[in-house]
Amino acid sequence: MRWALVKVSLAVTAMVVVAFAVPLGLVIKEMARDRAFSDAERDAAEIAPALSITTDRAQLERVVASAGSDAGMAVHIPDGDGTDAVEIGRQRAADADVAATRETGRASTAEVRDGSALLQPVALSSGQIAVVEVFIPDAAVAKGVGAAWAVLAGVGLALIVGSVAVADRLGARMVQPAQRLAEGAHELGEGKLGARVPEAGPRELRLAAAAFNSMADQVVQLLANERELAADLSHRLRTPLTVLRLNAASLGDGPAAEQTRAAVAQLEREVDIIIRTARDAKPQTAAAGPGAGCDAAEVVRERMEFWSALAEDEGRKVRMAGVDRPVRIPVARADLAAALDALLGNVFRHTPEGTAFAVDVHNGEDAVIVLVSDAGPGIPDPEAAMARGRGSGSDGSTGLGLDIVRRLAESTGGDVRIGSSVLGGTEVRIWIQLDGREPAPLRRGHRGSVRRRRRGGSRSVFNRPRSLP
């Protein structure tokens, strides 16, 4: 916008300068020419009284010398039969031009070398017509024109520079508040909730800045309310957790009792983490900076070790793949663990006992894919399952677990997709981007279930033309 205003001002001022300077320059040139010819006519007029009195050569030479110079003036006096009898000074005009002026009796101008010649007829006492020739050099015609044009050019250039400077200042006054507004919006989008914009500039931008600041205050208030609500809900879980812990303590010894007590302890720790996170006023991000993240293989092994005990009690077959070497991803360890727990918890809640499940980790050049598959009945409506706050059927599911997984993947520029697994049930694919690219624009449906084509490698089970059970 700033450069556009400068260009408009430059174009308009240049057109105005040209419109006025060019005609004015031509007028100055014409005025200089008129001045030179007026001086020549005045010099010729000084000779006319002497010619009307005498035609003596000596007296006329003295008059010519007093009027100017015989190098720039000449007098042509005919004799009695009409031929030139007396010639004073240097003749530059052609004889034909002199004769034509004598015959017409009117002043004329003739083009000569290095200038022009003014031919002025003068009546003698004898009735003959003498011709006074005054030489006007080109330098006299152009005298002062160059300086005047230089002044005009300087004034025009000063006007153009001044208009550009004024337009630049006006543009800066408009653009800088707009830039601050854009920077504030960018900072707010990055999670800097303290970003505010000074209310400066034109009235419209001041109103926009005030609206942005009000919106930012509302966002901060809404986030604070959300944290308080999460903390309050978590605190309400303390009482049933205490009862569970007491009941678990009274179960005695045995593998089932130990697993129950371990599950209750794990649930208490998760509730404590939720409370501390909700009370923290600073926004949390998945990866805090360069080098942040975790080893996906290690986290998968740890969570599968936890869930394997329960799977053994229910007679479920468990399989892991791709976790034999480190796999670094730009995701916080706690976030990946929460996502895996949400998916594996869904397997235990929504599939019959004895249903097998598997977790596979595929490490690519620019992405890591985590596949959680089972041999259960599958999900009839994947779109509804990905929608937060809506159940996928009549089983009472809220869909919050899949939403946790979706937000984890999209924080890296990846996505989540639900399809059919090779085990015959559901397969949830978590695509975790490694190169920090922005998420691709959505083409259809819910963003968590948009299907993207892989750029290399073998085809995934998601590309198989199998319908869900």
Image (cartoon, rainbow, N blue to C red):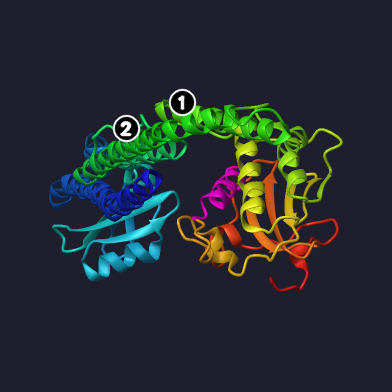
Q: Are marks 2 and 1 in contact (CB under 8 Å)?
A: no
* Tag 1 residue: 276
Q: Secondary structure of the magenta portion, mostly?
A: helix
Q: Nearer the viewer, residue 103 or 390?
A: 390
Res 421 visible: yes
Query: Which residue is labeled 2 in the image?
Result: 196
Q: Nearer the viewer, residue 114 or 191?
A: 191
Is 426 one of the magenta-colored residues?
no
Q: Which quadrant of the structure image shows residue 258?
A: top right
The residue sitting at 63% across, 42% down in the picture is 341
Please tell me which residue lies in front, 454 or 19.
Answer: 454
Which region shows up in magenta? 398-413
At 32% across and 47% down in the image, what residue appears?
141
What amino acid is labelled 2 in the image?
Arg
- The numbered dot on residue 64 is none
Circle 1 SS class = helix
Amino acid of disc 1: Arg
Instruction: Examine the image and state in which quarter residue 77 appears.
Output: bottom left
**Percent position (x, y) of residue 5?**
34, 47
Viewer-side label of 2, 1: 1
Residue 303 percent across, percent down from the top left: 71, 37
